[in-house]
Image (spheres, helix red, strand yellow):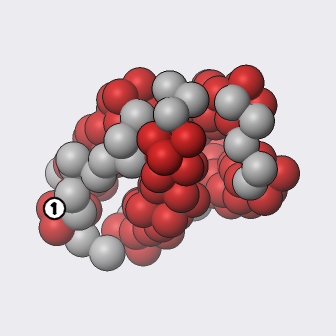
Amino acid sequence: MDLTASNPEMSVGVRILDFDHREMTEALYEIQRAVTADADPRRTGSLLRKLAEFSLTHFALEEGMMAATRFPGLARHRLEHHHIIGKMKTLVSRHQRSGLTLDHNSLRLVAELHAAHVEQDDLRYGLWLNATGKR
């Protein structure tokens, strides 16, 4: 997946989530620019950790909103969050411990996880939330 082809305006119809998704996409673009410029691995590692931390905060926000609105898909959505965070933690850990170079392939994995989650799981919540009028 080429990040330049992804849609930074991926919208799920929930303003605060859409804002976070754009922030995450921008973080991915920043990592891509660093990888393309062959930046210092400490820089790309720092950016990756920042994205992972932001993802944790964002996922907590989503899950809180889902609990507050009694979203019936919360348990499944929470599992998806754990799956994504697990993959990101593994990537960050390998980068830190074994000097794994962050390249376009590893970046593609993170970008695909992000896009698929927003376009499928988060969109499902946005549609449900807007349809039920619980906003």
Is residue 37 shown left or right of residue 48? left
Q: Quadrant of residue 1?
A: bottom left
Picture residue at 31% right of the left edge, 47% below the top: 11
Crowding at dot 1, Cα within 10 Å, few <14 / some 14-19 / many 20+, comes out as few
28 and 42: which is toward the camera: 28
- Viewer-side residue, 60 vs 37: 60
Across and down, in percent, residue 85 comes to: 69, 49
Give the image quarter of residue 112. Answer: bottom left
Can the viewer see residue 44?
Answer: no
In this figure, which residue is indicated by the disc labeled 1? 4
Q: Is residue 32 left or right of residue 115?
A: left
Residue at (55% x, 50% y) in the render: 128
Name above or below for residue 119 compared with residue 56: below
Seen at 55% across and 41% down, the residue is 132
Residue 65 in the image: x percent, y percent? 65, 27
Residue 119 lies, in percent from the top left, at 42, 62
Q: Is residue 115 visible?
A: yes
Residue under the image location 74 percent in, 54 percent down = 73
Question: Mark 1 is on which residue type?
Answer: Thr
Look at the numbered disc 1 and give the secondary structure of its residue.
Answer: helix
Q: Position of residue 82 (x, y in %)?
A: 77, 51
Picture quarter containing residue 100? bottom right
In the figure, is residue 13 to the left or right of 126?
left
- Of residues 21 and 40, which is closer to you in this image? 21
